[in-house]
Amino acid sequence: MPKFIRSRVQLGLLGMKECERLVSEVLSSDQIRDLLPHRYPFLLVDRVLELEEGKRVVGLKNVTINEPFFQGHYPQTPVMPGVLIVEAMAQVGGLAVGGASTEDLLPLLASIEKVRFRQVVKPGDQLIITATVLKARSGIFKIGAVAEVAQEVVADGELTFTLVPKGEG
């Protein structure tokens, strides 16, 4: 059972039945690659811990010193670039809108609003990203995204997606 889910059970936030349902819906990195068009080095979601398609997704990014961006950002004090934290939030958001699970539609990021960076993300951190659908209308989705490390918010904001036919991006 993923540590994130286990901690929620221990805190009494999830019952065992809910926990079993969530564990059965966890997506592996292979399954994520089937859903998202991104590939290394730009695939920034290692695992999906919770999935309520069309409503909410919780994804995980293991931040390691081997990430290519740490070579230049910053070598003496490695910090994950904020734009890549937002990109990771967007990738989880794309899974939340459910567009990536269809063969013919692709969720594209249309706008980024109210993004705040609250703490730095360093090698060794596990970035837990929760994306929740706030509004959906006519192929436009507004997502609330929160990125956490050790249950502390490191970034949050609102992302808007539009679903477009694949090949027309």
Image: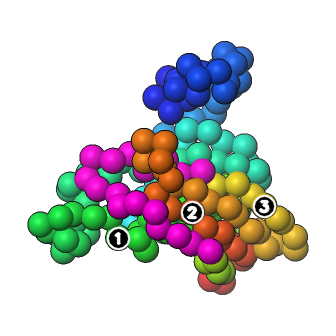
- Which residue matches tag 2? 156
Mark 3 lies on a secondary structure that is strand
- Which residue matches tag 1? 81
Report crowding for label 2: few under 14, some 14 to 19, many 20 or more residues within 10 A (C-alpha).
many
- Report the mark closest to the observer, 1 or 2: 2
Residue type indicated by callout 1: Pro
Question: What's the magenta region?
Answer: 114-130
Say if mark 1 contacts mark 2, CB within 8 Å: no
Report crowding for label 1: few under 14, some 14 to 19, many 20 or more residues within 10 A (C-alpha).
some
Q: Is residue 95 left or right of residue 85?
A: right
Residue type indicated by callout 3: Leu
Q: CA distance from mark 1 to mark 3?
A: 26 Å
Question: Residue 152, image x and y in percent?
Answer: 47, 48
Q: Which quadrant holds residue 115?
A: bottom right
Q: CA distance from mark 3 to mark 2?
A: 14 Å
Q: CA distance from mark 1 to mark 2?
A: 14 Å
Q: Is residue 111 left or right of residue 4?
A: right
Q: Which quadrant holds residue 22?
A: top right
Image mark count: 3
Residue at figure coordinates x 50%, y 33% from the top left: 4
Query: Would you place residue 90 above or below residue 13 in this image?
Result: below
Observer-nearest of 47 and 14: 14
